[in-house]
């Protein structure tokens, strides 16, 4: 009897677990065409590789190698827990070589899952070659709002040649690209400033990096690509754009300047001759880039006539002052007089209705007599 019950229990457990096992097996049964490398670039400084997943994949391993001849200089390994169907994933590796040597380099990227190699790609480049690209990045400045760059054409003895380029902007969190966009067919005739805002929410005090790639298409040879990465710390930011004040109160319009949500305070301080008369702290509405909100306050009482100092501070998420505006309030004498109240007009002497009626009645009786 116990053996019979044990058999039934084992059957039920196997029956219940079968869909889970089948689902797990289906998720891991991936052919090489279901996930592949669609883009690979490398330089002596860094490399980026983009994978495209056609199916649901889990536990993916990416192995990156930088080689000079037969010598392996650096190796990096990335793991991707999950890739959803019809998605792209871009990883960035920084080689961080201690010494640089001229020569021809080779970057090898291999992706595998469950010990099976799904795809392998190579990218070769030279370092120390006298050949110069047609354009170069003069400067790159990233911040919590976006990235600004300056690109320029190389000048030769024959002058600068106009170049059409594709400029790609990447926002990198750790080793993963979380946002990317491209300006296509940028005409570079002279020094050209460009900028791009991040369209994703950032985390306060978190480390990110901006990666910019410039592609110069060529019909005669392989396209020229140059890339540069610069790190930055994301911080909340906002500024005062408008301020109104008078004897009764004030209002300040604050504009968000960062993709880190601003959740700080607006502090209004009224003082006279260095002595604080009133301070009002108001919680700011949540602001991100290009968001603006107006905060209004009313003083406890109307300020007497005179000149006052007004300080408006924008306090950030961490308690730091991100913007301040100082001005004065010229309080005027109030036109309102408490003693000048409306009074009732004095009653005009005269007869009331009863007196008038009695008079007419008396005259009437006298005439009849």
Image (spheres, helix red, strand yellow):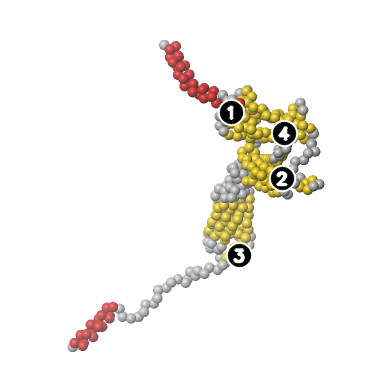
Which is more foreground, mark 2 or mark 3? Answer: 2
| Closer-to-camera residue (110/264) | 110
* SS label for mark 4: loop
- Determine if residue 231 is in view: no
Q: Earlier in the sequence, mark 1 or mark 2?
A: 1
Which is more foreground, mark 4 or mark 2? Answer: 2
Q: What crowding class fits label 4: few (fewer than 14 Cα within 10 Å), some (14-19), or many (20 or more)?
A: some
Residue 118 location in percent, x, y?
A: 63, 26
Which is more foreground, mark 3 or mark 4? Answer: 4
Find disc 3 in the rendering and name its residue: 307
Find disc 2 in the rendering and name its residue: 163
Which is more foreground, mark 1 or mark 2? Answer: 2
What is the quadrant of the C terminus in the image? bottom left
Q: Residue at x 78, y 48 (%)?
A: 159
Q: Earlier in the sequence, mark 1 or mark 3?
A: 1
Q: Residue furthest right?
A: 157
Marks 3/4: CA distance?
62 Å
* SS label for mark 3: strand
The image quarter containing residue 246 is bottom right
Find disc 4 in the rendering and name its residue: 95
Marks 4/2: CA distance?
30 Å
Marks 1/4: CA distance?
29 Å
* SS label for mark 1: helix
Residue 90 location in percent, x, y?
A: 63, 35
Left or right for 151, reference 206: right
Which is more foreground, mark 1 or mark 4? Answer: 1
Find disc 1 in the rendering and name its residue: 34
- Mark 1 and 2 residues: CB-CB less than 8 Å, in contact? no
């Amino acid at each position: 009897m116990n053996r019979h019950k044990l058999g039934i229990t084992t059957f039920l457990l196997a029956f219940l677990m079968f869909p889970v096992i089948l689902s797990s097996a289906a998720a891991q049964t991936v052919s090489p065409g279901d996930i592949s490398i669609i883009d690979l670039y490398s330089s002596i400084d860094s490399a980026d590789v983009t994978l495209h997943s056609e199916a649901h994949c889990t536990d993916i391993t990416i192995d990156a190698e930088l080689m000079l001849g037969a010598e392996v200089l650096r190796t990096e390994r990335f793991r991707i827990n999950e890739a959803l169907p019809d998605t792209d994933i871009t990883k960035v590796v920084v080689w961080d070589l201690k010494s640089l040597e001229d020569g021809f380099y080779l970057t090898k990227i291999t992706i595998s899952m469950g010990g099976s190699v799904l795809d392998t790609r190579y990218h070769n480049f030279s370092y120390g070659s006298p050949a110069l690209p047609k354009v170069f990045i003069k400067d790159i400045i990233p911040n919590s709002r976006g990235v600004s760059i300056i690109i320029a054409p190389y000048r030769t003895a024959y002058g600068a040649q106009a170049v059409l380029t594709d400029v790609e902007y990447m926002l990198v969190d750790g080793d993963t690209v979380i946002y990317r966009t491209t300006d296509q067919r940028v005409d570079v005739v002279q020094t050209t400033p460009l900028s791009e805002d991040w369209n994703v929410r950032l985390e306060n005090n978190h480390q990110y990096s901006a990666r910019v790639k410039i592609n110069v298409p060529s019909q005669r040879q392989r396209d020229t690509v140059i890339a540069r990465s610069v790190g930055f710390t994301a911080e909340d930011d906002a500024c005062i754009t408008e301020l109104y004040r008078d004897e009764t109160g004030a209002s300040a319009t604050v504009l968000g300047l960062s993709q880190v949500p601003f959740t700080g305070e607006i502090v209004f301080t009224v003082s006279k001759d260095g002595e604080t008369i009133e301070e009002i702290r108001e919680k700011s509405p949540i602001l991100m880039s290009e968001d603006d909100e107006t905060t209004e306050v009313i003083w406890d009482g109307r300020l007497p006539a005179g000149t006052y100092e007004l300080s408006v501070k924008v306090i950030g998420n961490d308690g730091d002052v991100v913007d301040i505006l100082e001005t004065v309030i010229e309080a005027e004498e109030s036109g309102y007089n408490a003693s000048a109240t409306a009074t009732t007009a004095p009653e005009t002497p005269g007869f009331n209705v009863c007196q008038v009626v009695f008079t007419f009645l008396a005259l009437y009786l006298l005439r009849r007599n």
